[in-house]
Amino acid sequence: MKTSTKLWIGIMLLIILSPLGLLLPEHFKAGAAWGEWGMDEIRSLVGYIPSGLAKLSELWKAPLPGYTFQGWEEKGLAHTSFTYIISAIVGIALTAAVVWFMGRKLTKKED
C-alpha cells in the first residue's frame, strides 16, 4: 500500500472519530475541550484576561462557532456529531488545499 493511501486512510479515520471531542469531555464532566476556552472560561481558569488576548479576541470569528450550524446548537448529539464531522472535513480540505497550493508555488521550476 502506498504511503499516501495510508495517509488518507488515517485522515478519514480521524474525521470519523472527531465526535469524540464532544463525547469525552461530557462523559468525564470536563467542560470545554482543552484550548477551546472562551474569554469567560479563561477568566475563571486564570483569574484575568491577558491584555494581548483581549485586544486580539475580536480579530477572528470562527466560521462554524461551536462546530455547529446556526440554530443546531440544541438539536442533540446526533446532529452535533454530524456537524463535527462536516467541520473536520471542511478544515482538512482547506488545510490540504493551502498546503497543496503552497507546495506547487514553492516547487515550481523556472524555465
Image (tube, rainbow, N blue to C red):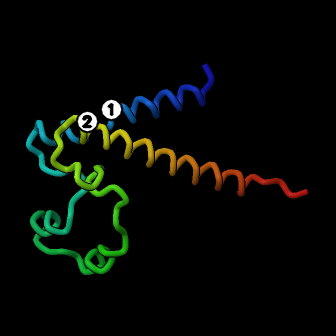
Q: Of the residues shown, which amino acid type is indicated by label 1? A: Leu
Q: Say what secondary structure mark 1 lies in.
A: helix
Q: Identify whether 53 is placed above or below 97.
A: below
Tell me if 2 is positioned left or right of 104 in this view. left
Q: Residues within 10 Å of mark 2 (few under 14, many from 20)?
A: few
Residue 24 position within the rendered picture, expressed as x and y whole percent measured from the top left = 18, 37
Q: Residue furthest front?
A: 71
Q: Residue 107 or 69: which is nearer the viewer?
A: 69
Tell me if 24 is positioned left or right of 14 in this view. left
Q: Residue furthest top?
A: 1
> Do the residues under discs 2 and 1 have CB atoms within 8 angstroms?
yes
Q: Identify whether 108 is placed above or below 2.
A: below
As measured in the structure, the alpha-carbon distance from the residue carrying label 2 to the one carrying label 1 is: 6 Å
Q: Residue at x 36, y 31 (%)?
A: 16
Which quarter of the figure has residue 63? bottom left
Which quarter of the figure has residue 111? bottom right
Q: Residue at x 20, y 64 (%)?
A: 38
Q: Residue at x 16, y 42 (%)?
A: 25
Q: Circle 1 sits on which residue?
A: 17
Q: Say what secondary structure mark 2 lies in.
A: helix
Q: Residue furthest right?
A: 111
Q: Identify whether 45 is placed above or below 79.
A: below
Q: Residues within 10 Å of mark 1 (few under 14, many from 20)?
A: some
Q: Circle 2 sits on which residue?
A: 20
Residue 10 position within the rendered picture, expressed as x and y whole percent measured from the top left = 46, 30
Tell me if 48 is positioned left or right of 1 in this view. left
Residue 93 position within the rendered picture, expressed as x and y whole percent measured from the top left = 51, 45
Q: Residue at x 37, y 46 (%)?
A: 87
Q: Of the residues shown, which amino acid type is indicated by label 2? A: Leu
Residue 52's tag is none
Which quarter of the figure has residue 106? bottom right
